Image: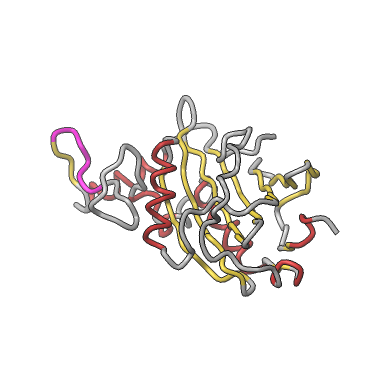
Amino acid sequence: MTPFDLITFDETGFRKEGDRPDLRVWRSDYGDGMGLYYFAIPPNIPVPLDQIDALRASIRSMLTAAGGAIIELEVVDVNGVPSIRQIIKKPQQPTGMTYVGSFTFPFRDRSLVLKIQCEERGVTGMREAVVLDQLLGNGSVTISDGKVEGWSADPYDASIQLPLMRNLAEDSGYDAQFPDHPLSRARRAMTQLQTSLRLHDALRDLPPFDGPSAAPPPPAPKRPWWRFGR
């Protein structure tokens, strides 16, 4: 049994593409990639999982430095094991967004990460344009000095102002209106995974992660952290 066989889930809508030394890859008909990573080193997580505000602050800082932003970040129970469930966004070049959802399963001396990557393709920004028009029409947002007031905010701390933040069009309430949008696809896949993920007893019996290790941090990944490629 390989480390990749220690987690199973409903693979409907995805086809397996194969294994690499540190990664098993699937691809959907939309072209979305899903990867299962295994790291045989202590997790590089700076705080215990029960310190949710500090965890969000740390990940927010890392994302901001990389030009990204938090859409959602929670600690959830998955098959009896604590997991970091998050969705983030990262700008594409020249336009559009990539949305990355992930479940991170940290243990004392290793971790597994299941990641789904959904890219915006074709004409970009349609969801934002339609929702903004709707909200301007009903007075929920206004434009002042060329700026849309109340359009973007950090989902967990309204006092924070950053170059890129979650916007109102990225609320889950709009997913049904835009079912093919990459954020809608990411959330749909995350729901499918969370309800179907099963961890082998060999994982469930491992010593749990209870805080950062005194060991030096692991080396930086060779590929960008938000992308596992094709």
The image quadrant of residue 63 is top left
Image location of residue 6, percent across then percent down: 76, 62
Do we see residue 26 in this rendering?
yes
Looking at the image, residue 206 sits to the left or right of residue 53; the answer is right
Describe the colour scheme in one phrase. Answer: secondary structure
Magenta extent: 145-150
Please identify the residue farthest to the left as the structure is shown.
Answer: 145
Q: Quick check: 149 above or below 175? A: above
Do we see residue 36 in this rendering?
no
Q: Is residue 131 magenta?
A: no
Please identify the residue farthest to the bottom as the structure is shown.
Answer: 80
Looking at the image, residue 142 sits to the left or right of residue 49; the answer is left
Between 131 and 73, the one nearer to me in the picture: 73
Between 161 and 221, the one nearer to me in the picture: 221
Q: Quick check: 215 above or below 76? A: above
Q: Residue at x 23, y 52 (%)?
A: 159
Between 95 and 75, the one nearer to me in the picture: 75
**Which quarter of the rendered picture does the C terminus lie within?**
top right
Looking at the image, residue 164 sits to the left or right of residue 30; the answer is left
Q: Quick check: 48 above or below 159? A: below
Q: Residue at x 57, y 43 (%)?
A: 118
Tell me how many marks there are. Answer: 0
Q: Residue at x 42, y 35 (%)?
A: 67
